[in-house]
Image: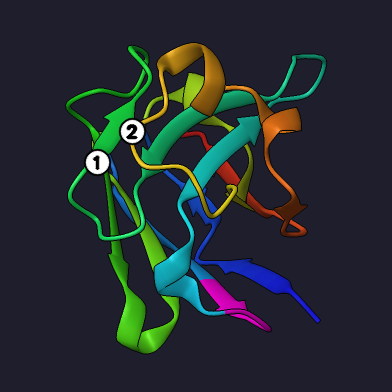
Amino acid sequence: QVQLVESGGGLVQPGGSLRLSCAASGFTLNQYALAWFRQAPGKEREGVSYISRTGESMYYSDSVKGRFTVSRDNAKNTVYLQIQNLKPEDTAVYYCLRGPSIWAMPPRDVWSVSSNYDYMGQGTQVTVSS
């Protein structure tokens, strides 16, 4: 069965860095786009990054642009989210989601909506605090 397992979260001081991983199984990763979303307590789930099947196209939300970098290693069935210069407002549970196989370069109002994805992992907690 399809599984997405996130890891790499933790407690970090402001300005610190983390690398989140999303290990995929039960499907051929190179046939699907993936995205990272996050959800803070009391807030709606927010799409922060998208990466196409081949990794050639990457999108970011304005709130993380310049600090977050998404990448993928299809040979290792893993997608990564490198986070630099963490801020307290980055505190959230981070999820990876699998997009439809037909996606290549969806517009922002499509890739940033979690209901357009078919599978989601259990999430990894990122807490930014001094």
First in sequence, mark 2 or 1: give its number: 1
Say above or below: 8 vs 55.
below
Q: Which residues are magenta?
A: 23-27
Looking at the image, what colour scheme do you see?
Answer: rainbow
The circle drawn on residue 105 is 2
Residue in view at x 50 percent, y 66 percent: 8
The dominant secondary structure in magenta is strand
* Nearer the observer, 3 or 15: 3
Left or right: 118 in relation to 16: right
Quadrant in the picture for residue 25: bottom right
Quadrant in the picture for residue 78: bottom left
- The residue identified by callout 1 is 84
Kind of residue sitting beneath label 2 = Met
* Nearer the observer, 19 or 54: 54
Element on which disc 1 rests: loop
Q: CA distance from mark 2 to mark 1?
A: 25 Å
Give x and y (percent) for residue 55.
Answer: 24, 56
Tell me, yes or no, whether the two marked residues, 2 and 1, touch with CB atoms within 8 Å: no
Residue 88 part of the magenta-drawn span: no
Residue in view at x 68 percent, y 84 percent: 26
Say above or below: 109 vs 12.
above
Give x and y (percent) for residue 117.
Answer: 68, 41
* Nearer the observer, 119 or 96: 119
Element on which disc 2 rests: loop
